[in-house]
Amino acid sequence: MNLQKQQLKEQLKHEHRDEMVQIGIRAVQHALRWIPGTSEAHRSITKYIELVQTKSSTIPELVRQHGQIQQAIANRVLAPLPYTIDTCLIHGTESLLKLSISEKYISGSMLNTVFVGCWNGASCLDDDKMRAEMKYQDDVLRPQIESAFEKLRDQEDKLAA
């Protein structure tokens, strides 16, 4: 019986992770409206989101490749990436990819790596757009995070009973 409870608890963790990742996807999709649909960045971000949504087995390989690229960059002296809406949203989406394969519980603060990329990107356009992204996250997404944790707590309480 103990093994069964442990398996159910593990399942709850994965369901919670999936729900938190969906919130991150909504954040990126909301901010993606600021990037022209024909741009390379838009296509890349859309591809990443599709990978996350299909739970593609290529995600761990993409994350590993990205880590190698980042390490190679750190080992050389290069000019930093430009601070643009494209680079900010790509950074946020890469964080989402990493969260989507995490074996840990995803906290609301872990989603901040996605959220910050979204409103930082909007800040490249103007302060009003940045504030609009922050307001969307605060008014729409953060209550969804709280709801996801309430649901998880309720399910864990039922499991413990």
Image (spheres, rainbow, N blue to C red):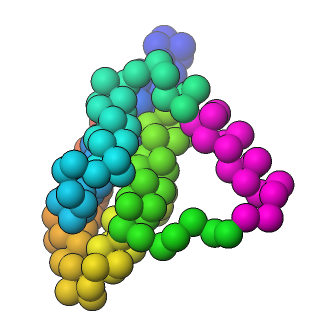
Note whether 105 is above or below 60 in the view shown: below
Counting every numbered tag in the picture gives 0
The residue sitting at 63% across, 69% down in the picture is 80
Q: Position of residue 132 (x, y in %)?
A: 19, 78
- Residue 58 visible to an observer of this rendering: yes
Which residue lies most toward the right here?
Answer: 75
The residue sitting at 63% across, 34% down in the picture is 65
Note whether 4 is above or below 133 in the view shown: above
Q: Which residue occupies the foreground of this view, 49 or 159?
A: 49
Q: Is 140 placed left or right of 79 in the picture?
A: left
- Residue 15 visible to an observer of this rendering: no
Quadrant of the image occupied by residue 3: top right
Q: Which quadrant of the rendered structure holds the C terminus?
A: top left
Q: Position of residue 67 (x, y in %)?
A: 67, 42
Q: Position of residue 25 (x, y in %)?
A: 28, 47
Give the magenta-colored segment's residue range: 63-78
Q: Main secondary structure of the magenta part?
A: helix
The residue sitting at 36% across, 29% down in the picture is 51
Quadrant of the image occupied by residue 123: bottom left
Say whether residue 92 is magenta: no
Say whether residue 65 is magenta: yes
